[in-house]
Image (cartoon, helix red, strand yellow):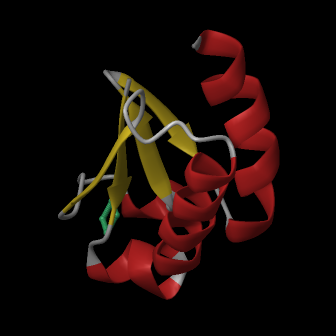
Amino acid sequence: MKITVCIGSSCHLKGSRQIVEKLQELIADKNLQDKVDLGGTFCMGDCTNGVNVKIGESKFSLSPKDTEAFFENEVLNQL
Ligand code: FES
């Protein structure tokens, strides 16, 4: 599974870095390094809805506090 977090400047200001760090931590906790490929991308052109995170082609709108729920519902449940 490929997860891409927008690290463009608007999403960065809304906490994309915390989201990336939290996801890294959750992936490591569950030992999913070989199942989940976490990456960053520049502006996705949808800054008002940031922080934008994609799983494949599906786009999600997250804030740092939603990261854990997102991980459980959209990542763990889909693996
Ligand atoms: S900076 Fe993330 S969509 Fe523009």
User: With respect to residue 41, does 78 lie above or below?
Assistant: above
Q: Residue at 30% x, 83% y: name it.
A: 9
The residue lying furthest to the top in this view is 78
- In the rendered image, the quadrant that contains the C terminus is top right
Q: Residue at 47% x, 78% y: name it.
A: 17
| Closest to the observer, 58 or 47 | 58
User: With respect to residue 7, does 58 lie above or below?
Assistant: above
The residue lying furthest to the front in this view is 31
Q: Position of residue 50 (x, y in %)?
A: 50, 60
- In the rendered image, the quadrant that contains the N terminus is top left
Q: Position of residue 47 (x, y in %)?
A: 39, 63
Numbered circles on residues, count: 0
Indicate the quadrant where residue 64 lies: bottom right
| Closest to the observer, 44 or 38 | 38
Q: Position of residue 73 (x, y in %)?
A: 76, 26
User: With respect to residue 70, does 65 lie above or below?
Assistant: below
| Closest to the observer, 3 or 10 | 3
Q: Quadrant of ligand 1?
A: bottom left
Q: Residue at 43% x, 42% y: name it.
A: 33
User: With respect to residue 45, does 63 lie above or below?
Assistant: below
Taking 27 as reference, is 63 left or right?
A: right
| Closest to the observer, 52 or 22 | 22
